[in-house]
Image (cartoon, rainbow, N blue to C red):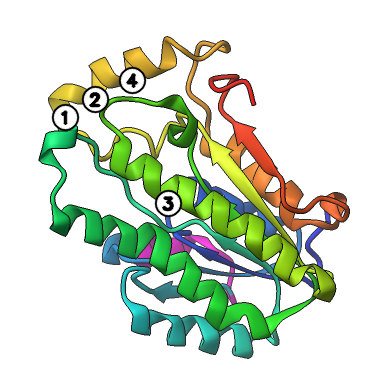
């Protein structure tokens, strides 16, 4: 496929999981891609893996000043045809263990981060560009242990709906990816001994009876980023094996 020839796409949180799978495919389909991440080893590995010319940027979504590097990348690329706001993290636990520090940290990365990123990058989005925001099926599951994480991911859905309205006059589309249990991102926040039980519990509720792959989630994000979704905005696309039946 050649959907991304001549198109420039920035993916935050693009050095692992869904984001990296998307970056690989955009490059394979002829696009120019920039990705961000925090882990030094992953940044180095991604720089070696992606084609020459791909940009790999050390960036922390929780840092308000980090948007400057994203703007610099967008300008160097000549503007953006696509933006996938994917960077986030998850921690789970009972309500009684939520602290002000934990609340502020997760809100800073998962909510303030994409809000400030879009605010800074909006002038660099070309007419006809597409924005994808990653939420989570946790927003709809009502799981007892995920209240803080689910709150952050519900917030980005609300933000994206407003962004879709605000950017529509510029012919810029905004849509939400709602992944369920994806193999590389739904267990890393758990202690090793708890992962197996958690995976069995979550996957046991999925009608397709398995976790998804990063490539399956990225395929839907890339559909939304491409011209194949030229009449789609303000929508949510669940990639969850039927977990929330949305």
Residue at the spot x=49%, y=30% of the render? 140
Relative vertical location of residue 47 with respect to residue 107 in this rendering, above or below: below
Instruction: Give the structural element (helix, strand or loop) at label 2.
Output: helix
Q: Position of residue 38 (x, y in %)?
A: 32, 66
Q: Which residues are magenta?
A: 42-53
Q: Nearer the viewer, residue 79 or 139?
A: 139
Residue 192: image tag: 1
In the rendering, at what x and y percent does residue 95 appear? 18, 35
- What is the crowding at mark 2: few (fewer than 14 residues within 10 Å), some, or many (at least 20)? some
Q: Earlier in the sequence, mark 4 or mark 3?
A: 3
The residue sitting at 37% across, 34% down in the picture is 186
Asked if residue 92 is positioned above or below residue 40 in the image, the reply reads above
For marks 4 and 3, give the one nearer the viewer. Answer: 4
Q: Is residue 60 magenta?
A: no
Does residue 46 belong to the magenta stretch? yes
Is residue 55 visible in this depiction of the protein?
Answer: no
Q: Are marks 3 and 2 in contact (CB under 8 Å)?
A: no
Q: Which residue is mark 4?
A: 199
Disc assigned to residue 195: 2
Gap between marks 4 and 3, in whole Å?
19 Å
Report the quarter where the C terminus lies: top right
Disc 1 to disc 3, how far (Cα)?
A: 19 Å
Q: Secondary structure at mark 4?
A: helix
The first of marks 1 and 3 along the sequence is 3
Residue 16 bears which disc, if any?
Answer: 3
- Majority SS type along the magenta span: helix
* CA distance separating discs 3 and 2: 19 Å
């Amino acid at each position: 496929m050649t959907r991304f020839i001549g198109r420039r796409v920035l993916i935050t949180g693009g050095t692992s999981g869904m984001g990296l799978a998307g970056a690989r495919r955009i490059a394979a389909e002829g696009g120019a891609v920039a990705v961000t991440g925090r882990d030094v080893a992953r940044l180095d590995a991604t720089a070696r893996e992606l084609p020459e010319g791909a940009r790999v940027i050390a960036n922390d979504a929780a840092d308000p000043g980090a948007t400057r590097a994203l703007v610099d990348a967008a300008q160097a690329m000549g503007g953006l045809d696509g933006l996938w706001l994917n960077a986030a993290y998850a921690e789970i636990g009972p309500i009684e263990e939520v602290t002000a520090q934990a609340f502020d940290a997760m809100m800073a990365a998962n909510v303030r981060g994409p809000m400030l990123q879009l605010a800074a990058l909006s002038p660099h989005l070309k007419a006809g560009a597409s924005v994808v925001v990653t939420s989570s099926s946790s927003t709809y599951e009502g799981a007892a242990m995920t209240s803080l994480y689910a709150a952050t991911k519900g917030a980005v859905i609300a933000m994206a709906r407003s962004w879709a309205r605000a950017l529509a006059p510029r012919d810029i589309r905004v849509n939400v990816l709602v992944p369920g249990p994806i193999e590389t991102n739904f267990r890393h926040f758990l202690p090793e001994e708890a992962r197996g039980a958690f995976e069995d519990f979550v996957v046991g509720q999925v009608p397709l009876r398995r976790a998804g792959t990063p490539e399956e989630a990225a395929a839907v994000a890339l559909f939304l980023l491409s011209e194949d979704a030229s009449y789609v905005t303000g929508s949510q696309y669940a990639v969850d094996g039927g977990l929330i039946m949305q």
